[in-house]
Image: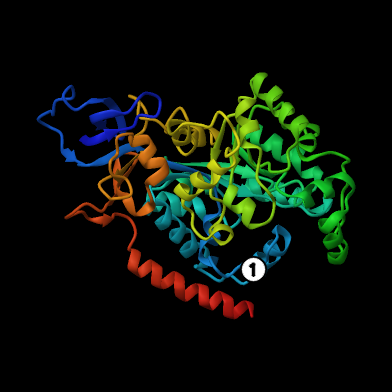
Amino acid sequence: MLLRARHVLPITSPPLLDGAVRVEDGRLTDVGPASDLRPRTDEEIVELGCTALLPGLVNAHSHLEISILRGHVGGRDLLSWIDSLIHLVKVFGEGDHQTSIRLGVLEALSSGITCVGDHGLSGEVPGVLSETGLRGVSYQEGFAFHPRDVAATLDRLSGELPYWRAEAGPLVTIGLTPHSPYTSHPDLWHGLGELAERENLPVSVHLAESPAEVAYLRDGGGPIGARRHVQGRPTWECERRPVEFLKDRGWLDQSFPLQLVHLTQANAAELALLTEAREEGRTLGLVACPRSNLRLGNGLPDLPGWSRLGLRWGLGTDGAPAVGSCDLFQELAHAETTFANETDRPAAATWLRRVTLDAAASLGLDDRIGSLEAGKEADLVALDLSGPHTTPAADPEAAVVFGARPSDVSWVMVGGKVLVDRREGGSGLATLDAPTLLAEAERRAEEIVDRAG
């Protein structure tokens, strides 16, 4: 297949005017000016017109299995929001998780996202991703609120690995997550790290997300400690800040790919620890979710500081109930505001990397996706730049970053397979029946809320 577009944005090199990309066996084999890439007799030619053709967007942090709860989770701070979420999730019935995940996939593909870094507990995400054709790293959650829960959690994670891997298929990588330092007892971290090392699994952690987390790790107190007392659960005090807690567990020295999400409360000393680990060769990626952080009252991460220290970071949306929409274009707009007072503000090209190559790097996938280069896998999105909000597109990278929206997505390919074609005469979505799915999601959400009272 030979794809031709008005603008081709490779990410690792300047934009091409009237560019072309050749795809063979699910991979990119040529990227260059259309005048240099002559059609071959045995290939299909796809004219994408006045579009920007770029790598598929990478949502570095999502929670697909709760997409169905959009608009139903209350709470104006992180802990009350989590309480509301748990109250609803515990009454999920058969099929609710799968419908929710498919709804999240539908939103992702419709908004140009071709890969997700997803946290989930149900174990259903790998199979649905494989079925619908979306690429992803599916981090399986393990919780342990009490030392006696540790062995059972590790047994479950290791025992389910063969099933998850069989369900995953070639586009999906299985990972692990202990969720966060305040939901998993310190005893769990050693065993989970050993499991990740032994099975060569990537790991993701919510870290330094809220002031409550910092207070709890310091002395077992604060609102989290108070809730543990009411629930009759043990508390643990580490006299450490979140990144120090991670270092004490040995996680800054191990070899498995490590993704750290949020870090709104990470101070300069903690960022220095992460910089030191990166300089010593630790495979480490950071993820910012500014809309979620603001919505739940946790403040914003020090993104300018991350950049100055040379820490590589990408963007994620977090879960739909927290932010309303899993829209990386909105996430870009919010992230940019963190640089409002900076004299050296990032250019559009840098922001594009945050939702493509750098986000892929946080998942350990930047050698496979995230840029248009020969040998990489064919995850592509075409954005229509003919609308009034993106015209003129003299700087196509700026048009995408500062003007584009999900409705501009006209064409999506993952692994060489066309999954979305909204062009005139196009087939729409290849693997999902959107009207049927939306109606089912609406019905199931109402039933969940009714069951939860």
The part of the image, by quadrant, that contains residue 66 is bottom right
Which quadrant of the figure contains the N terminus? top left
Kindly give the residue lying farthest to the left in the view shown: 41
Spot occupied by residue 378 in the image (x, y as percentages of width and height): 33, 35
Spot occupied by residue 207 in the image (x, y as percentages of width and height): 70, 43
Q: Is residue 1 visible from the viewing direction of this image?
A: no
| Residue located 63% across and 77% down the image | 452
Q: Secondary structure at mark 1?
A: loop
Q: Is residue 323 visible from the viewing direction of this image?
A: yes
Above or below, comparing residue 411 to residue 450 in the picture: above
Spot occupied by residue 332 in the image (x, y as percentages of width and height): 49, 44
Q: Amino acid at mark 1?
A: Gly
| Label 1 environment density (alpha carbons within 10 Å; few <14, some 14–19, many ≥20) | some
Count of picture labels = 1
| Residue located 69% across and 55% down the image | 297
| Residue located 66% across and 43% down the image | 205
Above or below, comparing residue 262 to residue 360 in the picture: below
- Residue labelled with disc 1: 74
